[in-house]
Image (cartoon, rainbow, N blue to C red):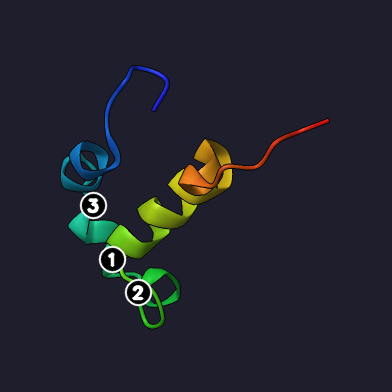
Amino acid sequence: MNDGYQLNDIVHMVKVDQEMLGLPWLQPLYDEPEFVVRNIWRMYGGGGMLIQHH
């Protein structure tokens, strides 16, 4: 994000280590890794909402 990448670029660049996914407490039961990336983008990138700060 800070380097100027677009969301779709980041979604395709981020890969989860398969060894990590094998751990029972890190398995994506409720959210896929792509969903997590998109939520981080929304949280830190503003989500594209036009909110004016006073």
Compared with residue 11, is residue 26 higher up or lower down, i.e. above or below? below
Whether 10 is drawn above or below 27: the answer is above
Compute the Cα span from label 1 to label 2.
5 Å
Vertical side of 13 occupied by 32: above or below = below
Location of residue 14 in the rendering, given as x and y in whole percent from the top left corner: 24, 43
**Residue nearest the observer in this picture, 3 or 29:** 3
Which mark sits nearer the N-terminus, 3 or 2? 3
Give the residue at x 40% y 68%. 26
Residue occupying the point 27% across, 33% down: 6
Looking at the rendering, in which quadrant would you find the N terminus? top left
* Residue type of the residue flagged with mark 1: Leu
Q: Which mark is residue 49?
A: none
Q: Position of residue 2 (x, y in %)?
A: 42, 20
Element at badge 3?
loop
CA separation, marks 3 and 2? 11 Å
Residue 17: numbered disc: 3
Percent coordinates x, y for residue 44 in the rendering: 55, 39
Q: Is residue 24 left or right of residue 9?
A: right
Identity, as a three-letter code, of the amino acid under mark 3: Asp
Q: Locate residue 9 relative to residue 7 in the image: left or right.
A: left
Q: Nearer the viewer, residue 33 or 46?
A: 46
Q: Residue 54 in the image: state x and y as whole percent.
A: 83, 30
Q: Which mark is residue 27?
A: 2
Taking the image as shown, residue 44 lies to the left or right of residue 20, namely right
In the rendered image, which residue does mark 1 sit on? 21
Label 3: few (<14), some (14–19) or many (≥20) C-alpha neighbours in 10 Å: few
Q: Are marks 1 and 2 in contact (CB under 8 Å)?
A: yes
Residue drawn at point x = 50 percent, y = 37 percent: 45
Residue sitting at the far top: 3
